[in-house]
Amino acid sequence: MKTTLRKIVMEARELFREHGYDGASMQDLAARVGLKKASLYTRFPNKEALVSEVLTLTLEETLKGLPDPREDWQLAWQTLIGRIAKTFETRKRCVGLHLAYGVTSVTPEAQAAVSQFFNVLRERMADILRLGGIPQPDSAAADILAQLEGATLWITTSGDVEPLRRAVKSASRLDVFGRKI
Amino acid sequence: MKTTLRKIVMEARELFREHGYDGASMQDLAARVGLKKASLYTRFPNKEALVSEVLTLTLEETLKGLPDPREDWQLAWQTLIGRIAKTFETRKRCVGLHLAYGVTSVTPEAQAAVSQFFNVLRERMADILRLGGIPQPDSAAADILAQLEGATLWITTSGDVEPLRRAVKSASRLDVFGRKI
DNA sequence: CCTACCGATCGGTAGG
DNA sequence: CCTACCGATCGGTAGG
């Protein structure tokens, strides 16, 4: 039951990542988890509600069990960046980015969920940088996340992971926009 | 006639930018240009063919009349970056990025068109950097384009254009990943 | 360039 | 958790 719920959300994430919000179908999702479409609606009120579930799960996985930045902020930072990059490299794309472009004002709750997802992620990143004494941690976090997200463009269009790898190295050294570690 | 064709492609671009490949409908496109849907099919064989038209137009607009980089590579560079950023700031998103995430292996010609679009753009950027004696111009161009594209994430999710503005400044100074001008 | 239509699929619901 | 269905919309075509 619980595992089924989690499975549904994980499969929904794969569909959103690959096909975007519009392109992901409830029929496809049902088939992936071995249910009929109607049965999905006993767990979720509608398709839109899946977005916040997917992003909550992703945020959890990204932040869970991170090394305490108050003990070793550099280790926490490297671990966080590494997790994000690993997902991008494995899955080729970022669900969050696909949803950011895919949700519009006709699905306002999904839009709010996406916006919150990225704000929380940026804040967590900034928290770590702040502990490291990095100037303007909020801007730095936003810029580094933008670089990582943008690098998925090259992975998805030509399979080139080098821009992502360079982004990770640069993020590790904090040499973003002249901040340098 | 010619103007109608161009108008169709421009409106298709707006639809792809806002709604992605799947989310853009031929019916909507027809309504925008004052035709019935069936009439679109006298100009274009199918929806997929619109993708390369849209990207060809965009590439033209981006590169047309650029200052000759052999005379003043820095002026050419600033102009090109400025054009890209202006579109992102005005339209809030990048069509190319939305299409990159939106086309799959079921639309292989569209996929090829997107891949070519970004490769050509990166090559043009790298050409300019090469004339400026920037080391590893191809990587630098890819990284800077990634940063600009990634910055649209913040525009589209929270209306924050500051990451894009910082990306433009950084690109102008070429202070990407320790290259510095 | 239109009207009228095609089969397929969409998100979602009724009713058990 | 299913079968069976709803109206709406999709890309695309026939035929004039």
Image (cartoon, coloured by chain):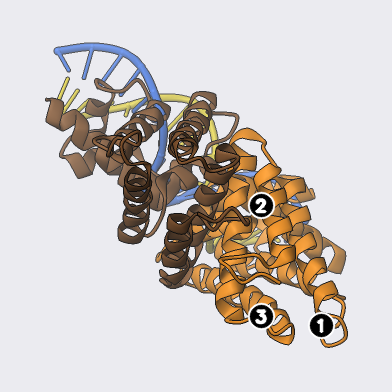
Chain colours: A brown, B orange, C blue, D yellow
Residue B103 makes an appearance in the image: no
| Dot 3: chain letter | B
Q: Position of residue D6 (x, y in %)?
A: 40, 24
Q: Tag 1: residue type?
A: Pro
Q: Residue B100 location in percent, x, y? A: 52, 61
Which residue in the structure is indicated by mark 2?
B37
Other residues around mark 1 within 10 Å, as few (<14) / some (14–19) / many (≥20): some
Residue A55 in the image: state x and y as whole percent. Answer: 38, 34
Tell which of B49 and B151 is nearer to you. Answer: B151
Q: Nearer the viewer, mark 1 or mark 2?
A: 1
Packing grade of label 2 (10 A; few <14, some 14-19, many >=20) is: some
Tell whether label 2 touches label 1 (CB within 8 Å): no
Same chain check for tags 1 and 3: yes
Going by the numbered disc 3, the residue's amino acid type is Ile
Please give the chain letter of the residue carrying mark 2: B
Disc number for residue B134: 3
Which residue: 77% across, 47% down? B90
Residue B4 percent across, percent down from the top left:
82, 61
Q: Secondary structure at mark 1?
A: loop
User: What secondary structure is marked by label 3?
Assistant: loop
- Which badge, 1 or 3, is on the more N-terminal residue? 1
Q: Does label 2 lie on the same chain as label 3?
A: yes
Chain at numbered mark 1: B
For badge 2, the amino acid type reads Lys
Q: In the displayed structure, would residue A70 be above or below residue B130?
A: above
Q: Nearer the viewer, residue B152 or A104?
A: B152
Q: Nearer the viewer, mark 3 or mark 2?
A: 3
Q: What's the mark number on residue B69?
A: 1
Q: Disc 2 on helix, strand or loop?
A: helix
